[in-house]
Image (cartoon, grey):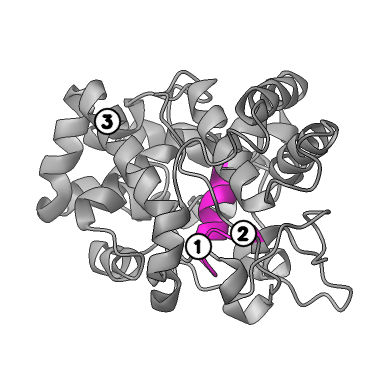
Amino acid sequence: MASLRLGLFVAAAVVSAALMPPSAVAQLRPGYYSSICPNLELIVKSSVKQSMAQSPISAPAALRLFFHDCAVRGCDASIMIVNSNGDDEWRNPDNQSLKPEGFQVILNAKAAVDSDPQCQYKVSCADIMALAARESVVQSGGPYYEVELGRYDGRLSTKASVVLPHANFTLDQLNSFFSGLGLSQSEMIVLSGGHTLGAADCPFFQYRIGTDTTMDATFASQLNATCSSNPTSGFAFLDTSQVTFDNAFFRNLQSGKGLLGSDQVLYTDTRSRGTVNYYATNQGAFFGDFVAAMTKLGRVGVKTPATGGEIRRDCRFPN
């Protein structure tokens, strides 16, 4: 069970990351690789399926990785870069919750794509990440959606560039971060619904136990037992459906069973409670709005050759 521990998922960004040149807007479209790598989506789908069969945390880890990537320099796979001097995004403390399984999903899919002679070194890591995120949702029971493609990979990754919200953020703080992505409060809430997958380690929520009156007492007692016996390795699922993509996350908030403070505040604060109630009673609406928000998120900070983008041969290193 220890392998099921997942850290905090957040989708926020530096304001500048949300800015995308018109040329990048024009290049993004479904079917971008139809003549370049016609079997791309089937290859990624099969690879993600294999990864999920090998580890149940592959799907939530890959989905979270996509958010963490887009949140910093835009959706350019910079989160994948490993710098020899240790100065890269994934070694920033705010990214230490990301699990190896998420990175491996992308590396496996990239290897599968490049094993096709027609596709070799023609598909960006950034686009593979976007497709893998979609497959993580779909293959966990969530909605299918067309993924806009045509991103190029960035060449830079630094610790200092990582700015993310924390598990104790208020609604105002969350809105401030997400507005930097060009996303509204409603879009922030629906993306937070991605917490229907995965789990969080005790340090992300233990401070709330016994002190946060918005937490259900029975739920708090259960969490206390988990974290008291395993203070460094304990974890809890982000919602009761664990690894199924559904709207249980929002129903949990209604009953005071949101694991993270930044999740529970979406219901506690009356300014956002109505949206939580809406998604809690209408899974179809949640699915539809999640797809729209994911598509919008996927446009953040997209790179082109003109803005320094490339197609990496190895997702871990610039060419």
**Number of callouts:** 3
Location of residue 63 with respect to 286 vertically, above or below = below
Residue 256 in view of the camera: no
> Which residue appears at 73% of the width and 72% of the height?
88
* Left or right placement of residue 144 versus residue 257 in this view: right
Location of residue 126 with respect to 218 vertically, above or below = below
Are circles 2 and 1 on residues that touch, CB within 8 Å?
yes
> Which residue appears at 76% of the width and 35% of the height?
113
Would you say residue 110 sits in the magenta stretch? Answer: no
Q: Quadrant of the N terminus?
A: top right
Find numbered disc 3 in the image and state the secondary structure of the residue it sits on. helix
Q: Position of residue 60 (x, y in %)?
A: 57, 36
Are circles 3 and 1 on residues that touch, CB within 8 Å?
no
Q: Quadrant of the C terminus?
A: bottom right
Question: Circle 2 sits on which residue?
Answer: 152
Question: Circle 1 sits on which residue?
Answer: 302
Are circles 3 and 2 on residues that touch, CB within 8 Å?
no
Among numbered discs 3 and 2, the one appearing first in the sequence: 2
- Crowd rating for badge 3 (residues with CA inside 10 Å; few <14, some 14–19, many 20+): some
Q: CA distance from mark 2 to mark 1?
A: 7 Å
Q: Position of residue 296 (x, y in %)?
A: 35, 51
Q: Nearer the viewer, mark 3 or mark 2?
A: 2
> Which residue appears at 42% of the width and 43% of the height?
259
Q: Amino acid at mark 2?
A: Tyr
Question: Circle 3 sits on which residue?
Answer: 288
Magenta-drawn segment: 63-77
Query: Quadrant of the rendered structure where residue 171 is?
Result: bottom left
* Left or right placement of residue 102 versus residue 188 in this view: right
Query: Quadrant of the rendered structure where residue 15 is?
Result: bottom left
Q: Amino acid at mark 3?
A: Gly
Q: Position of residue 199 (x, y in %)?
A: 55, 38
Q: Amino acid at mark 1?
A: Val
